[in-house]
Amino acid sequence: MKCRALLVLALLLLAVTAARGQEAAWTFSAGYSNIQFNEHTNGTFYTRDGPYFDFDFLFRIPESKVPLLVGGGFGASGYFDSRDVTFPAFSGFASTTLYSDVSLFSFEARAAMPISFGRGPRGFFIMPKIGMGLLVSNYAIDTVQVTPTVTILNTRYFTGAAFDIRPTIQAGYSWGPGSAGIEASYMIAWGDFGDLGSQAQEVRIGAFFRFRF
């Protein structure tokens, strides 16, 4: 997993180097994210709602007849939940709070094609975008197991890797070197998510800001 992350970072550095002297842009976005795993076993639980942030660096391919942008990006989303439980104890009953912290980190190669509705660098636009690469998942989820003789409180930890594909659509307004707007994306990933299964689907809705230079 570390080797894959280093490979993606190396590709990003190559993209920055190749972009010198070419039209390039940084983009930052943040907003609401919804996650769904295909299973959760062994008493694990999670919330489907959480925040995300994302940034990427794209540059235009030199001498391309279409405005195709390529590069890489990094994103992260977090899902935090808690629930109160009551269980038998020596004095009768006891209660505690269980916590669930699930995080996703994506390292993706990306390509995009802006479609402008204005003349020159100013005006409204939409931009389809596609990303794919490494998705790292991490969680710490409290569990409780009640037996006739003992109650066991435990925290399950896991870090795993998966492959993800993420199509995105952005719509906004450009005023020259800067642009802003809204975005929506859908991600599907296959890999090892521990007790949460082998597949994840994530939907994001947020706002973005782009600076071109």
Image (tube, helix red, strand yellow):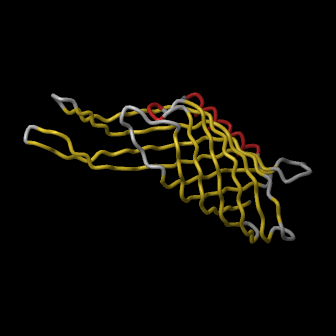
Q: Tell me how many marks there are.
A: 0
Which residue is rendered at x = 60% and y = 37% of the image?
189
Question: Is 28 placed above or below 196 here?
Answer: below
For the residue pair 68 and 147, the one nearer the viewer reads as 147
Residue 37 spot, x, y in % from top left = 52, 40
- The residue at the far left in this view is 91
Q: Is residue 148 left or right of residue 24?
A: left
Residue 43 spot, x, y in % from top left = 36, 36
Q: Is residue 69 left or right of residue 88?
A: right
Question: Quarter of the image holding residue 207?
Answer: bottom right
Residue 77 spot, x, y in % from top left = 51, 49
Residue 146 spot, x, y in % from top left = 23, 33
- The residue at the far front in this view is 148
Which residue is rendered at x = 18% and y = 29% of the image?
148
Q: Is residue 143 left or right of residue 90?
A: right
In the rendered image, the quadrant that contains the N terminus is top right
For the residue pair 12 and 36, the one nearer the viewer reads as 36
In the rendered image, the quadrant that contains the C terminus is bottom right
Question: Quarter of the image holding residue 204?
Answer: bottom right
Which residue is rendered at x = 53% and y = 47% of the image?
35
Question: Is 161 placed above or below 49 here?
Answer: above
Q: Is residue 16 left or right of residue 4?
A: right
Question: Quarter of the image holding residue 187?
Answer: top right
